[in-house]
Image (cartoon, helix red, strand yellow):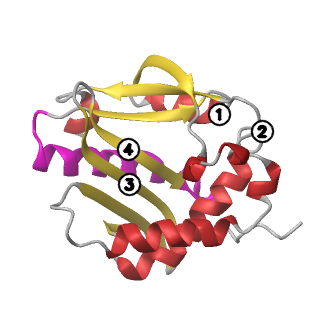
Amino acid sequence: MPPSAPEPHAARPGGPEPRFRAAGAADAAAVAALHAASWRRHYRGAYADAFLDGDVVADREAVWSARLADAHDGGRRLTYVCEAGGAVVGFVHAVLDEHPRFGALVDNLHVGYGSQRRGVGSRLLRLAARGVAERAPASGLHLWVLEQNDRARAFYSALGGSRTERALVPPPGGDPARLAGSPACLRYVWPAGSALFRR
C-alpha cells in the first residue's frame, strides 16, 4: 500500500500565526496533497480502497492544476488557503451560482489533521462566505458532507448550517468503481444574511 501524502501541521502555540489568502496556481501541488490526505483519512468506507490507496495525489493534482490555472472563469470560483509555518494547512473552494435556490456551493473544505480544532476550518468557511457576499449579495451557501462523517456534520451544525436533504455520493471523476457501495451525503445550507455571512 503506498504511503499517504504527508499532512501539514499548523504552528504550535508560540509559533507563527496562520495566514489566510487567495490561492494561486503555485498552490496546486500543496492543495492537492492536503486534499488527497484528507480523503484517505476521512473518506475510507465511502470511497473504494483501491482508489484511495492508489495514486490519488496525481488525480487531485490534475484537478487543482486546472482549477487554479484558469483565470477566465469570470470570478465564479473562489479558492482560499491557510498557511502556517510556510505550509498550506487548509483550503476552501466555492463556486458561485451553482444552485438556483441554495446559491454558491462550497465544493471543498479541508484542514490538515494536525491543524484541526484550531479555528482554521471555521475561518476558511467564513472567508468563503464573505467572498460570495461581495460578488453575489443575494446568494446563500450550501455544501454536501458524507453522512458517515459525524465530526464534520457537528462542525457545520455548530456554524449554523441547516440540513436539508440526503442524496447518494457522486463518484469521484464520474467513475462508479471509485465508490465503496452506495454511500450517502447530506446537504447543509446557509441562507444569504445568515450569521455565517456576517462574521
- Distance from the alpha carbon under mark 1 to that under mark 4: 16 Å
The stretch of residues the image draws in magenta is: 111-138
Judged left or right of residue 103, residue 36 is right
Residue 45 marker: 2
Q: Residues within 10 Å of mark 3 (few under 14, many from 20)?
A: many
Residue at (41% x, 35% y) in the render: 143
Q: Which residue is mark 4?
A: 106
Q: Secondary structure at mark 1?
A: loop
- Distance from the alpha carbon under mark 4 to that under mark 2: 22 Å
In the rendered image, which quarter is residue 24 located in? bottom left
Q: Which residue is mark 1?
A: 149
Judged left or right of residue 56, residue 191 is left
- Residue 185 part of the magenta-drawn span: no
Labelled pair 3, 4 in contact (Cβ < 8 Å): yes
The amino acid pointed to by label 1 is Asn
Between 92 and 98, the one nearer to me in the picture: 98
The amino acid pointed to by label 4 is Val
The amino acid pointed to by label 3 is His
Q: Say whether disc 2 or disc 1 marks the residue closer to the N-terminus.
A: 2
Secondary structure mostly seen in the magenta stretch:
helix
Labelled pair 1, 4 in contact (Cβ < 8 Å): no
